[in-house]
Image (tube, helix red, strand yellow):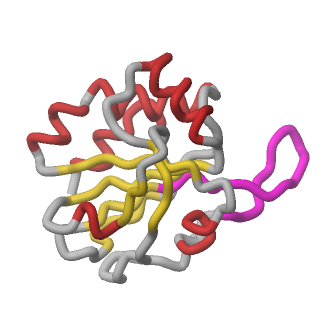
Amino acid sequence: MTSLKNGDRAPDFSGIDQEGRKVSLKDFKGNKLVLYFYPKDDTPGCTAEACNLRDNYDTLLKKGFQILGVSADSEESHKKFISKYVLPFPLIADKDKKIIHDYGIWGEKKRYGKIYQGILRTTFIINEDGIIEKVIGKVDTKNHTEQIIID
């Protein structure tokens, strides 16, 4: 579980998106950012979360939010995921897990009785000045937009 909390300065980051473009936190200065971390492209929970954000994209934009997803998948995997589900926002390929570790969302998980290390699905709402306004640790993948816009 992340040690970051509301009121903390968001760790600066820089990564490569699905098109090979560099994306940094500073690119979003002056905008609210939904920075969401998810385990793996094209899996049921991650697809539900991404599609919920896609389906509510216009609402989120109207409320002043930009959206950026991060996982350890490759640029090519992200490109296929975006194409398959027509996602209107970029995804960072954090293959070396630097951003994932900086945000403290790499940790112990359990699945089918097995314990392993992986990405802990977490969303950070970062304000126009780079301050974390909200940390969503228990993401409801099918209703994630509601979690974001409810104060």
Percent from the top left, x then y, of residue 109?
76, 54
Image point (60%, 33%), residue name = 76
Residue range (magenta): 106-122
> Of helix, strand and loop, which mostly describes the magenta segment?
strand
Can you tell which quarter of the image residue 96 is in? bottom right
Q: Nearer the viewer, residue 117 or 91?
A: 91
Q: Quadrant of the N terminus?
A: bottom right
Image point (11%, 46%), residue name = 63
Percent from the top left, x then y, of residue 54?
33, 28
| Any part of residue 1 in sight | no
13 w.r.t. 53: above or below: below
147 w.r.t. 4: above or below: above
| Any part of residue 92 in sight | yes
> Which residue is at the far bottom?
8
Image point (34%, 82%), residue name = 9
Image point (19%, 41%), residue name = 60
> Would you say 76 lies left or right of 48 here?
right
Percent from the top left, x then y, of residue 140?
46, 40
146 w.r.t. 13: above or below: above
Q: Nearer the viewer, residue 25 or 6?
A: 25
Residue 15, magenta (yes or no): no
Percent from the top left, x then y, of residue 70?
51, 50
1 w.r.t. 60: above or below: below
